[in-house]
Image (cartoon, rainbow, N blue to C red):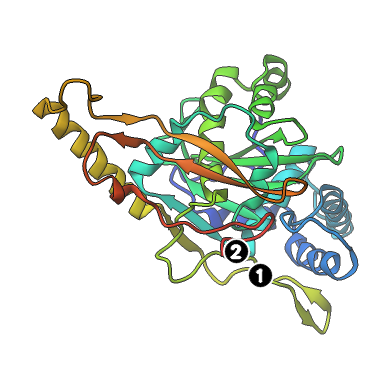
Amino acid sequence: MTPHLPPVDQDDARPPADFVKRVGQRFPGIWPELDRLRGELLTHVRDFPAHWYLPFHAVARTMDSALIEMGRAGLNPPRFTVATVNLVGTIAGWRVTQGVYRFDTTLFDALITTPVSGRLPTDLLSRLPEWTVYIETPGMQWAGELLRGVFAQVGEMDDGAECLYFVLSVRRQLYGFLIRLDQPSLEVSLDLACHPESCAELGISESDVRGLLPRIVSLLLYLCSESAELGDGTRLPERPVPRRTKKGVRMFPADRQTTWDVGMRMGAALRLAYREDEEERAGGSGGHGSPRPHIRRAHWHTILSGSRQNPTRTLRWLPPIPVNVERIEDLVPTLRSVAAGGTPG
Protein backbone atom coordinates (compact mmCIF):
# COMPACT_ATOMS: atom_id res chain seq x y z
CA MET A 1 0.00 0.00 0.00
CA THR A 2 1.58 3.27 -1.09
CA PRO A 3 1.03 6.68 0.49
CA HIS A 4 -1.12 9.16 -1.42
CA LEU A 5 0.51 12.40 -0.32
CA PRO A 6 4.20 13.37 -0.44
CA PRO A 7 5.95 13.30 2.94
CA VAL A 8 6.60 16.43 4.94
CA ASP A 9 10.05 17.37 6.15
CA GLN A 10 9.52 17.27 9.90
CA ASP A 11 9.50 13.92 11.65
CA ASP A 12 6.79 14.83 14.12
CA ALA A 13 3.12 14.27 14.79
CA ARG A 14 0.89 15.98 12.28
CA PRO A 15 -2.45 17.32 13.52
CA PRO A 16 -5.42 16.14 11.41
CA ALA A 17 -6.03 19.65 10.06
CA ASP A 18 -2.54 19.62 8.56
CA PHE A 19 -3.67 16.99 6.05
CA VAL A 20 -6.56 19.20 4.94
CA LYS A 21 -3.99 21.87 4.14
CA ARG A 22 -1.74 19.45 2.28
CA VAL A 23 -4.55 18.05 0.12
CA GLY A 24 -5.53 21.62 -0.74
CA GLN A 25 -1.96 22.39 -1.75
CA ARG A 26 -1.71 19.26 -3.89
CA PHE A 27 -5.03 19.96 -5.64
CA PRO A 28 -5.46 23.76 -5.67
CA GLY A 29 -9.06 24.91 -5.60
CA ILE A 30 -10.43 21.46 -4.73
CA TRP A 31 -12.09 22.42 -1.43
CA PRO A 32 -14.37 25.24 -2.69
CA GLU A 33 -15.46 23.01 -5.57
CA LEU A 34 -16.31 20.10 -3.29
CA ASP A 35 -18.14 22.48 -0.92
CA ARG A 36 -20.25 23.68 -3.83
CA LEU A 37 -20.83 20.13 -5.05
CA ARG A 38 -22.12 19.00 -1.64
CA GLY A 39 -24.57 21.88 -1.54
CA GLU A 40 -25.88 21.08 -5.02
CA LEU A 41 -26.33 17.40 -4.22
CA LEU A 42 -28.49 18.16 -1.19
CA THR A 43 -30.54 20.64 -3.24
CA HIS A 44 -31.09 18.63 -6.43
CA VAL A 45 -30.59 14.90 -5.67
CA ARG A 46 -33.40 13.00 -3.99
CA ASP A 47 -32.75 10.08 -1.68
CA PHE A 48 -29.05 10.88 -1.36
CA PRO A 49 -27.73 8.74 1.54
CA ALA A 50 -27.55 10.95 4.62
CA HIS A 51 -24.41 9.20 5.90
CA TRP A 52 -22.44 9.84 2.68
CA TYR A 53 -20.66 13.13 2.28
CA LEU A 54 -19.95 12.94 -1.48
CA PRO A 55 -20.29 10.13 -4.05
CA PHE A 56 -17.07 8.69 -5.46
CA HIS A 57 -17.65 9.62 -9.11
CA ALA A 58 -18.52 13.23 -8.26
CA VAL A 59 -15.24 13.62 -6.34
CA ALA A 60 -13.31 12.02 -9.23
CA ARG A 61 -14.84 14.41 -11.78
CA THR A 62 -14.05 17.40 -9.58
CA MET A 63 -10.43 16.26 -9.21
CA ASP A 64 -10.17 15.81 -13.00
CA SER A 65 -11.41 19.37 -13.49
CA ALA A 66 -8.92 20.67 -10.93
CA LEU A 67 -6.03 19.00 -12.77
CA ILE A 68 -7.17 20.48 -16.07
CA GLU A 69 -7.16 23.94 -14.52
CA MET A 70 -3.68 23.32 -13.11
CA GLY A 71 -2.46 22.40 -16.60
CA ARG A 72 -3.96 25.55 -18.07
CA ALA A 73 -2.20 27.57 -15.39
CA GLY A 74 1.16 26.07 -16.38
CA LEU A 75 1.42 23.89 -13.27
CA ASN A 76 2.45 20.23 -13.24
CA PRO A 77 -0.75 18.28 -12.38
CA PRO A 78 -0.18 15.33 -10.01
CA ARG A 79 -1.35 11.88 -10.99
CA PHE A 80 -3.99 10.25 -8.84
CA THR A 81 -5.51 6.82 -8.36
CA VAL A 82 -8.83 5.41 -7.17
CA ALA A 83 -7.41 5.32 -3.65
CA THR A 84 -6.50 9.01 -3.89
CA VAL A 85 -10.09 9.87 -4.77
CA ASN A 86 -11.27 7.98 -1.69
CA LEU A 87 -8.69 9.77 0.43
CA VAL A 88 -9.74 13.22 -0.80
CA GLY A 89 -13.44 12.43 -0.28
CA THR A 90 -12.74 11.21 3.26
CA ILE A 91 -10.70 14.28 4.21
CA ALA A 92 -13.38 16.50 2.63
CA GLY A 93 -16.00 15.00 4.96
CA TRP A 94 -13.79 15.60 8.00
CA ARG A 95 -12.93 19.17 7.01
CA VAL A 96 -16.48 20.44 7.56
CA THR A 97 -16.79 19.05 11.12
CA GLN A 98 -13.19 18.44 12.33
CA GLY A 99 -14.19 16.10 15.13
CA VAL A 100 -11.39 14.25 16.94
CA TYR A 101 -12.50 11.32 19.11
CA ARG A 102 -10.35 10.58 22.17
CA PHE A 103 -11.31 7.39 24.00
CA ASP A 104 -10.89 6.79 27.70
CA THR A 105 -7.83 4.56 27.90
CA THR A 106 -9.54 1.73 29.81
CA LEU A 107 -12.51 1.69 27.46
CA PHE A 108 -10.14 1.89 24.49
CA ASP A 109 -8.27 -1.22 25.64
CA ALA A 110 -11.54 -3.08 26.28
CA LEU A 111 -12.95 -2.19 22.86
CA ILE A 112 -9.92 -3.16 20.79
CA THR A 113 -9.96 -6.62 22.37
CA THR A 114 -13.70 -7.11 21.73
CA PRO A 115 -14.11 -9.56 18.81
CA VAL A 116 -15.95 -8.30 15.73
CA SER A 117 -17.55 -11.65 15.03
CA GLY A 118 -20.88 -13.22 14.24
CA ARG A 119 -23.50 -11.70 11.97
CA LEU A 120 -23.04 -8.04 12.84
CA PRO A 121 -24.82 -6.13 10.03
CA THR A 122 -22.61 -3.93 7.89
CA ASP A 123 -25.20 -1.13 7.88
CA LEU A 124 -24.49 -0.45 11.56
CA LEU A 125 -21.52 1.62 10.43
CA SER A 126 -23.83 4.08 8.65
CA ARG A 127 -24.49 5.60 12.09
CA LEU A 128 -21.19 7.38 12.63
CA PRO A 129 -21.82 10.69 14.43
CA GLU A 130 -20.15 12.70 11.63
CA TRP A 131 -19.53 12.03 7.93
CA THR A 132 -15.86 11.46 8.65
CA VAL A 133 -14.51 10.84 12.13
CA TYR A 134 -10.90 10.97 13.27
CA ILE A 135 -10.07 8.65 16.17
CA GLU A 136 -6.84 8.85 18.11
CA THR A 137 -5.04 5.51 18.43
CA PRO A 138 -2.51 5.69 21.28
CA GLY A 139 -0.06 2.80 21.31
CA MET A 140 -1.22 1.29 18.01
CA GLN A 141 1.18 0.52 15.19
CA TRP A 142 0.95 -0.03 11.47
CA ALA A 143 3.77 -1.99 9.79
CA GLY A 144 6.14 -1.20 12.65
CA GLU A 145 5.34 2.53 12.64
CA LEU A 146 3.42 4.50 15.24
CA LEU A 147 -0.20 4.96 14.17
CA ARG A 148 -1.24 8.42 15.30
CA GLY A 149 -4.87 8.27 14.27
CA VAL A 150 -7.41 7.10 11.71
CA PHE A 151 -9.90 8.97 9.54
CA ALA A 152 -12.93 6.82 8.71
CA GLN A 153 -15.90 7.42 6.42
CA VAL A 154 -18.67 5.31 4.94
CA GLY A 155 -19.19 6.08 1.27
CA GLU A 156 -19.25 4.82 -2.27
CA MET A 157 -16.67 2.68 -4.07
CA ASP A 158 -15.76 3.20 -7.72
CA ASP A 159 -18.09 0.30 -8.64
CA GLY A 160 -21.01 1.85 -6.75
CA ALA A 161 -20.92 -0.47 -3.74
CA GLU A 162 -20.80 0.95 -0.23
CA CYS A 163 -17.54 0.78 1.70
CA LEU A 164 -15.86 1.87 4.89
CA TYR A 165 -12.76 3.80 3.92
CA PHE A 166 -9.83 4.26 6.30
CA VAL A 167 -7.07 6.86 6.09
CA LEU A 168 -4.21 6.00 8.45
CA SER A 169 -1.99 8.77 9.81
CA VAL A 170 1.40 7.11 10.22
CA ARG A 171 4.21 9.45 11.24
CA ARG A 172 4.27 11.99 8.38
CA GLN A 173 2.11 10.05 5.91
CA LEU A 174 -1.43 9.10 5.02
CA TYR A 175 -2.28 5.59 3.85
CA GLY A 176 -5.71 4.51 2.67
CA PHE A 177 -7.59 1.25 2.25
CA LEU A 178 -11.19 0.08 2.52
CA ILE A 179 -13.52 -2.75 3.41
CA ARG A 180 -16.61 -3.54 1.36
CA LEU A 181 -19.97 -3.24 3.09
CA ASP A 182 -22.02 -5.11 0.48
CA GLN A 183 -21.42 -8.37 2.36
CA PRO A 184 -23.78 -10.35 4.64
CA SER A 185 -21.89 -9.36 7.80
CA LEU A 186 -18.96 -7.31 9.06
CA GLU A 187 -17.07 -10.51 9.81
CA VAL A 188 -17.25 -11.48 6.12
CA SER A 189 -16.23 -7.96 5.06
CA LEU A 190 -13.18 -8.10 7.33
CA ASP A 191 -12.23 -11.57 6.06
CA LEU A 192 -12.34 -10.29 2.47
CA ALA A 193 -10.19 -7.27 3.35
CA CYS A 194 -7.69 -9.52 5.14
CA HIS A 195 -7.57 -12.15 2.40
CA PRO A 196 -4.01 -12.79 1.13
CA GLU A 197 -4.98 -11.86 -2.44
CA SER A 198 -6.56 -8.57 -1.34
CA CYS A 199 -3.48 -7.67 0.68
CA ALA A 200 -1.13 -8.65 -2.14
CA GLU A 201 -2.96 -6.33 -4.56
CA LEU A 202 -2.37 -3.42 -2.19
CA GLY A 203 1.18 -4.46 -1.33
CA ILE A 204 0.44 -4.71 2.39
CA SER A 205 0.99 -7.42 4.97
CA GLU A 206 -1.92 -9.73 5.81
CA SER A 207 -0.75 -9.89 9.42
CA ASP A 208 -0.73 -6.07 9.67
CA VAL A 209 -4.28 -5.86 8.32
CA ARG A 210 -5.62 -8.66 10.55
CA GLY A 211 -3.93 -7.12 13.56
CA LEU A 212 -5.31 -3.62 13.00
CA LEU A 213 -8.59 -3.65 11.06
CA PRO A 214 -10.84 -5.42 13.62
CA ARG A 215 -9.56 -3.11 16.36
CA ILE A 216 -10.37 0.03 14.39
CA VAL A 217 -13.78 -1.33 13.40
CA SER A 218 -14.56 -2.09 17.05
CA LEU A 219 -13.79 1.51 18.03
CA LEU A 220 -16.00 2.78 15.20
CA LEU A 221 -18.82 0.44 16.20
CA TYR A 222 -18.80 1.99 19.66
CA LEU A 223 -19.33 5.44 18.12
CA CYS A 224 -22.30 3.96 16.22
CA SER A 225 -23.76 2.10 19.19
CA GLU A 226 -26.84 2.90 21.24
CA SER A 227 -24.76 3.30 24.41
CA ALA A 228 -22.07 5.58 22.97
CA GLU A 229 -20.97 8.13 25.57
CA LEU A 230 -19.70 11.20 23.69
CA GLY A 231 -18.50 14.41 25.31
CA ASP A 232 -19.72 15.71 28.64
CA GLY A 233 -23.43 15.32 27.89
CA THR A 234 -24.09 19.03 27.26
CA ARG A 235 -23.83 18.73 23.48
CA LEU A 236 -23.26 16.14 20.77
CA PRO A 237 -21.54 16.02 17.37
CA GLU A 238 -23.72 17.22 14.52
CA ARG A 239 -23.56 17.43 10.75
CA PRO A 240 -23.71 20.99 9.44
CA VAL A 241 -26.10 22.06 6.70
CA PRO A 242 -25.17 24.02 3.55
CA ARG A 243 -25.74 27.76 3.37
CA ARG A 244 -27.04 29.90 0.53
CA THR A 245 -24.49 32.34 -0.85
CA LYS A 246 -24.30 34.69 -3.84
CA LYS A 247 -22.43 31.88 -5.62
CA GLY A 248 -25.03 29.24 -4.81
CA VAL A 249 -25.51 26.73 -1.99
CA ARG A 250 -22.23 25.78 -0.30
CA MET A 251 -20.78 23.92 2.63
CA PHE A 252 -18.24 25.66 4.83
CA PRO A 253 -15.45 24.10 6.89
CA ALA A 254 -15.51 24.08 10.68
CA ASP A 255 -13.71 27.02 12.30
CA ARG A 256 -11.60 24.78 14.49
CA GLN A 257 -11.00 21.20 15.60
CA THR A 258 -13.36 19.81 18.25
CA THR A 259 -12.13 17.06 20.56
CA TRP A 260 -14.78 14.67 21.85
CA ASP A 261 -13.94 12.66 24.95
CA VAL A 262 -15.41 9.18 24.53
CA GLY A 263 -16.57 6.89 27.34
CA MET A 264 -15.11 8.74 30.33
CA ARG A 265 -17.82 7.48 32.70
CA MET A 266 -17.72 3.97 31.28
CA GLY A 267 -13.93 3.87 31.60
CA ALA A 268 -14.10 4.92 35.26
CA ALA A 269 -16.72 2.24 35.94
CA LEU A 270 -14.59 -0.41 34.26
CA ARG A 271 -11.56 0.54 36.37
CA LEU A 272 -13.69 0.23 39.49
CA ALA A 273 -14.92 -3.19 38.41
CA TYR A 274 -11.41 -4.41 37.62
CA ARG A 275 -10.16 -3.19 40.99
CA GLU A 276 -12.99 -4.88 42.87
CA ASP A 277 -12.38 -8.05 40.90
CA GLU A 278 -8.72 -8.03 41.95
CA GLU A 279 -9.66 -7.37 45.58
CA GLU A 280 -12.18 -10.22 45.57
CA ARG A 281 -9.60 -12.56 44.06
CA ALA A 282 -6.98 -11.55 46.63
CA GLY A 283 -9.48 -12.03 49.45
CA GLY A 284 -10.48 -15.46 48.20
CA SER A 285 -14.18 -14.71 48.74
CA GLY A 286 -16.99 -16.68 47.21
CA GLY A 287 -18.66 -19.47 49.15
CA HIS A 288 -19.17 -23.08 48.19
CA GLY A 289 -21.24 -23.39 45.03
CA SER A 290 -21.04 -19.72 44.07
CA PRO A 291 -18.94 -18.68 41.05
CA ARG A 292 -15.62 -17.02 41.73
CA PRO A 293 -15.68 -13.27 41.02
CA HIS A 294 -14.49 -12.60 37.48
CA ILE A 295 -14.95 -10.30 34.51
CA ARG A 296 -17.04 -11.69 31.65
CA ARG A 297 -15.71 -10.91 28.19
CA ALA A 298 -17.12 -7.89 26.32
CA HIS A 299 -19.12 -8.45 23.16
CA TRP A 300 -21.33 -6.73 20.61
CA HIS A 301 -25.07 -7.29 20.69
CA THR A 302 -27.73 -6.28 18.15
CA ILE A 303 -31.24 -5.62 19.40
CA LEU A 304 -34.44 -5.79 17.35
CA SER A 305 -37.43 -3.67 18.34
CA GLY A 306 -40.67 -2.50 16.76
CA SER A 307 -42.88 -4.48 14.43
CA ARG A 308 -41.97 -7.95 13.25
CA GLN A 309 -42.48 -6.94 9.63
CA ASN A 310 -40.25 -3.87 9.83
CA PRO A 311 -38.03 -4.13 12.91
CA THR A 312 -35.60 -1.44 14.04
CA ARG A 313 -32.06 -2.73 14.63
CA THR A 314 -29.75 -1.10 17.16
CA LEU A 315 -26.26 -1.98 18.34
CA ARG A 316 -25.11 -2.16 21.92
CA TRP A 317 -21.66 -2.83 23.30
CA LEU A 318 -21.92 -5.03 26.37
CA PRO A 319 -18.84 -4.17 28.42
CA PRO A 320 -16.71 -6.60 30.41
CA ILE A 321 -19.31 -7.56 33.02
CA PRO A 322 -18.23 -8.24 36.61
CA VAL A 323 -19.74 -11.46 37.95
CA ASN A 324 -20.08 -11.79 41.75
CA VAL A 325 -18.55 -8.35 42.25
CA GLU A 326 -20.20 -5.66 44.39
CA ARG A 327 -21.52 -2.33 43.03
CA ILE A 328 -22.30 -3.68 39.56
CA GLU A 329 -24.68 -0.73 39.11
CA ASP A 330 -21.66 1.51 38.59
CA LEU A 331 -21.20 -0.15 35.19
CA VAL A 332 -24.54 1.07 33.79
CA PRO A 333 -23.66 3.44 30.92
CA THR A 334 -25.52 6.52 29.77
CA LEU A 335 -27.75 5.34 26.90
CA ARG A 336 -28.50 7.44 23.84
CA SER A 337 -30.53 6.27 20.88
CA VAL A 338 -29.02 6.45 17.38
CA ALA A 339 -31.25 6.74 14.36
CA ALA A 340 -30.03 5.10 11.17
CA GLY A 341 -27.96 7.59 9.21
CA GLY A 342 -28.34 10.22 11.91
CA THR A 343 -26.50 11.60 14.88
CA PRO A 344 -26.94 10.58 18.50
CA GLY A 345 -29.93 12.28 20.05
User: Viewed as shown, does residue 61 lie left or right of 180?
Assistant: right
x, y percent for residue 201: 73, 21
Distance (Cα) linking label 1 and label 2: 7 Å
Crowding around mark 1 (Cα neighbors within 10 Å: few <14, some 14 to 19, many 20+) is few
Q: Do the residues labelled 1 and 2 touch (CB within 8 Å)?
A: yes
Q: Residue 162 carries which label?
A: none
Judge depth for marks 1 and 2 and give the one in front: 1
Depth check: give the residue in front, 213 or 323. Answer: 323
User: Viewed as shown, does residue 279 lie left or right of 115?
Assistant: left
Depth check: give the residue in front, 158 or 175. Answer: 158
Q: Which amino acid does label 1 sit on?
A: Pro
Residue 320 in which image quadrant: top left
x, y percent for residue 196: 67, 15
Q: Does dot 1 land on a helix, a strand or a loop? A: loop
Residue 204 in which image quadrant: top right
Q: Residue at x 39, y 29 (%)?
A: 297
Q: Which residue is drawn at 36% across and 51% down?
A: 332
Position of the C terminus, as image quadrant, is bottom right
Depth check: give the residue in front, 68 or 321. Answer: 321
Q: Mark 1 points at which residue?
A: 240
Look at the picture and state if 76 lies above or below 293.
below
- Residue lying farthest front? 289
Q: Which residue is drawn at 53% across and 59% down?
A: 99
x, y percent for residue 71: 87, 54
* Visible residue check, residue 81: no
Q: Mark 2 points at which residue?
A: 97
